Structures are given as C-alpha cells and as structure tokens.
Image (cartoon, grey):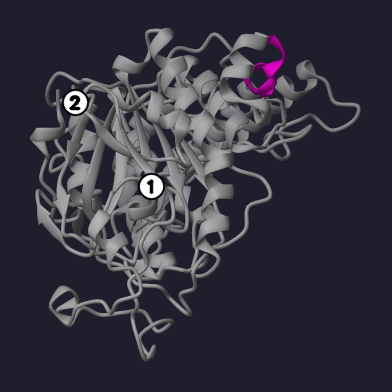
C-alpha cells in the first residue's frame, strides 16, 4: 500500500528510503565529536592479506622527468650524439604534434656524468647527489610505461587509473577502502610546491569522483591559512562554533529523515572534520618544533613554507599523525627546450628533500610501513625536440619507457628493475604499466586491487579498471 509520507520524495530518495534507519544511526555517530575521536574504518571489513605498508607518500614530478638524464644511463646514446634516431628503434611509434613534423630526429646524449652508487652499483646522475646516498633504500623501476602521450590525460591516468577526468583519485580509493588512522586530520592530504611553472595542477586530481565526497583530498597551502576558510570568522570562538554545528546537525538529521539522502551524512561529517582540523592543522603545519639538525637534513629550502623540501618535511609530520595518503605535486619537469639548465634547477629543488624524507622516515622507524613513490607521468625522448647544439637540447614526451622509484613499505631495497634499449626508447625486459604500479601499491597496503570496487551507474569500478597485475618481483 502506498505510504503518503513518501508522496514528496523523488525516485532516488524513495529507493534509498529503505536504508533510512541505518543512515540515521550513522548520523548519530557523526554528531559532536571532539579532537579525541577514534579512527574511522573503511568499507573493507578486513584486509585481503597481511599488509606491508600502512600509508603512502607520493612525490609526483609533474611534467615528465628525463630518465636518460637522471636514472637510465645510456653510454651508446652519448656516443651517437647528433646522429639520427634509427627507424628500427622508433618502429613507427607515434610522436606528439610538437616533434612529428621535424625534418630530423637527432639523438641527444645526456650532458651529465653518471656514477655507480650503493652496494649494488646503481647508476645515478650527478644531478642527484643526495638521492645517490640513499639508493640502497630505493627500488628503481626503469621499465615503466603508460598509454597517454600528453600531460593532462597522462597525469589523470596516474592519479585515477583513467585518462578521462572524473574518476576517484588513488588517495580517495584508499580513504574509501581503508579508512582513517586518525580522525583529527583528513585521510588524504595534498601539498603543491609553490611557484611552480609548467603544466597546471587541477584539484580534480585529488577528487573523490563518484565516491562519497568525504574521501576527496584536502590541500594544505603555505602561509597563514593552510586550509582555506578553516579559521573562525572574527567574533566567533570555538564554543560558539560547537553550538552552531550542534544545531546544524539537528537540522541535517531532520533533512536526512525526510529524504534519506546519504549526501546529508557526508555534509555533516565534513563539518565535523573541519571543526577538529581547527585544532590539528595549526599543530601539524608548525615546523618551529623541528630541530635544526632535521631542518638541515632537508636543506635550506625546508625553512621556507611551500617549497618542495618543506612539503617533504610536512609530509613526514602528516604521516606521523596518521594521514593515510599524502600526495606532493612538484611542477616544472616539462623540458621541451633548455633541458640542461632546467633539469639542473629542478633537481636542485627536489633532490635533497626527497632523499631526506627517506632518511628521516627510516631513522624514525617509519620507512618499513610507509611506501614512498617518486616519478612523473611519462618520460622523455632520446632525440632532441628542436635544434641540438653543443650545449643545449630539449626532449619531447615519451610514454614508452621511463623511470620511477619506490622506497619502504615492503618493496625490495637496492633493486634496479627492468631494462630498456640502448636509447631508452623501448623496454627490453620486465615492463611495468601504470595499472601494474597501482595494483602493486594496493597489494602492499593489504588490498586486492580486483576486490576494492564501487558500484556506479550499474557497473562496479576499481582503481585499476579491468587491468593490472601485482609485480611480485618488487616486493621484499
């Protein structure tokens, strides 16, 4: 029999009404909680297997670092500097519109010295002297490859598992599946280096897509207000804000009882998180309590908020306080011309901070259960885009092979995995695709990537779509 109480409900609300009582119970759990709130579980009842990592710090080098200038030592490429890229190497592979019409494709050898470092003699460029000192902690993957050849789809692919915008980001998936280790801070935080140039970084890269909005990343900024609109307005104190939120929660409960809309629950949960963050964010972003020794470890930039080094230090502080996923974005690696000078500047800005993060985590006993990932959205071409001169060259986008590294969190330290040809143009051994990387990251966190799904528009989605294999060779 038709219930007149539902007369004003739309179809979506009617279908959701069956879960009304459960939703009300969930809302009751969200109502006023102070800073002592316990961690919130994710949708997974239990991990699929024993985890090696609890959290992830992802250092994303936006623009595409040149693998043969940093990690993939190619002496033959250097010897053939200025000669044409052999057609047998290119084998008809597509080029971007920026170099497809070049009359020639002259090979450009790296202008930087390489040396072997660590117990296993890993080749590292002179541009990365600090990272070279921690290479025994790294798992260097020289055989990464991706599907996208242009920046926006390529960056989106790495962050969401799809080249099309709108899917949940990897941090949102982890928040949804694993939940929070500390409810006083977001499960997923984002730090963007200030003053970067190059490809834009959009907030959708840390969005929740079709997942509940509570799982989206929260960007922390340099300056007096790390999170916009978090502080109370003038004349409003914490007690008044608490009273306001309590009354607002009452109104939201009435709305939820009338509509059964789960977004009401998301809204009040975000209000409560913001209230708790008013106390937790000033503490975590205040680096004044760090010792001079620690600040010196990260380098002189660590004392300047918003720099990559300062963000690496802040990432460690966030990880210490239970943030599940910390994403750093550093722009400026898109070096189509003037690569020798530009890549030197980029490495000077990032090398010490990244190496210090690995060192700092290890000495605090956190590296073993913190997965650190470093890399961009694709690599660069062995040939020069534009004119090749005695002291200058540029490189175009190259998705066929590039280098990333991982550290901690259960990966094999001191491993150099995968091989490329003499020109770092094609993979010759042990390819690792973006979906494989995502599957491996989830595996290290105790999650079977095929079983963490969300039903949306009649289909069950996952981070790895319908692809991806765990790369067991990378796991210690």
Residue at the farthest right position: 235
Instruction: Tell me the element at label 2.
Output: loop
Q: Position of residue 234 (x, y in %)?
A: 90, 30
Q: Position of residue 194 (x, y in %)?
A: 66, 45
Identify residue for label 1.
Answer: 70
Name the residue at 59% across, 48% down: 345
Q: Which mark is residue 40?
A: none
Query: Mainly helix, strand or loop, the magenta region?
Result: helix
Q: Position of residue 49 (x, y in %)?
A: 12, 23
- Residue 181 placement, left or right of 412: right
In which quadrant will I find the C terminus? top left
Instruction: Specify start and end residues of the magenta stretch as a single range.
Output: 278-290
Q: Which mark is residue 412?
A: 2
Real-space Cα separation, disc 1 to disc 2, in angstroms: 21 Å
Tell me the crowding category of disc 1: few under 14, some 14 to 19, or many 20 or more residues within 10 angstroms, Cα based: many
**Vertically, is 262 above or below 411?**
below
């Amino acid at each position: 029999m038709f219930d007149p109480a539902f007369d004003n409900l739309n179809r979506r609300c009617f279908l959701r009404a069956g879960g009304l009582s459960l939703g009300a119970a969930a809302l009751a759990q969200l109502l006023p909680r102070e800073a002592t709130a316990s961690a919130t579980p994710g949708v997974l009842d239990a991990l699929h297997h024993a985890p090696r990592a609890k959290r992830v710090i992802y250092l994303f080098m936006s623009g595409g670092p040149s693998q043969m200038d940093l990690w993939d030592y190619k002496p033959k490429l250097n010897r053939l500097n200025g000669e044409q890229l052999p057609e047998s190497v290119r084998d008809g592979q597509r080029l971007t519109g920026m170099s497809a019409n070049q009359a020639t494709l002259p090979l450009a050898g790296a202008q930087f010295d390489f040396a072997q470092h660590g117990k296993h003699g890993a080749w590292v460029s002179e541009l990365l002297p600090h990272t070279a000192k921690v290479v025994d902690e790294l798992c260097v993957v020289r055989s990464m490859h991706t599907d996208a050849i242009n920046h926006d789809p390529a960056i989106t692919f790495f962050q969401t598992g799809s080249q099309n915008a709108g899917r949940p980001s990897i941090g949102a998936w982890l928040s949804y599946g694993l939940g929070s280790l500390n409810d006083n801070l977001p499960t997923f935080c984002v730090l963007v280096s200030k003053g970067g140039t190059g490809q834009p970084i959009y907030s959708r890269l840390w969005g929740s897509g079709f997942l509940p909005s509570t799982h989206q990343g929260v960007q922390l900024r340099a300056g007096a207000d790390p999170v916009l609109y978090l502080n109370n307005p003038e004349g409003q104190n914490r007690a008044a804000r608490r009273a306001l939120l309590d009354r607002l929660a009452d109104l939201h409960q009435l709305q939820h009882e009338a509509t059964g809309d789960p977004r009401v629950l998301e809204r009040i949960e975000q209000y409560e998180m913001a209230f708790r963050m008013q106390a937790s964010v000033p503490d975590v972003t205040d680096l004044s309590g760090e010792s001079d020794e620690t600040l010196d470890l990260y380098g002189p930039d660590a004392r300047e908020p918003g720099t990559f080094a300062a963000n690496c230090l802040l990432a460690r502080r966030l990880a210490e306080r239970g943030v599940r996923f910390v994403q750093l974005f550093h722009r400026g690696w898109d070096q189509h011309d003037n690569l020798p000078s530009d890549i030197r500047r980029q490495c000077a800005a990032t090398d010490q901070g990244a190496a210090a993060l690995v060192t700092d985590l290890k000495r605090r006993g956190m590296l073993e259960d913190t997965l650190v990932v470093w890399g961009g959205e694709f690599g660069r071409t062995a040939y020069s885009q534009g004119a090749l001169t005695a002291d200058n060259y540029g490189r175009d986008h190259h998705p066929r092979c590039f280098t990333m590294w991982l550290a901690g969190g259960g990966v094999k330290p001191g491993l150099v995995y995968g091989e490329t040809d003499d020109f770092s143009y094609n993979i010759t051994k042990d390819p690792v695709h973006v979906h494989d990387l995502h599957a491996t990251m989830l595996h290290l966190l105790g999650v079977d990537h095929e079983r963490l799904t969300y039903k949306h528009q009649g289909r069950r989605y996952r981070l790895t779509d319908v692809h991806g294999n765990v790369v067991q060779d990378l796991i210690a």
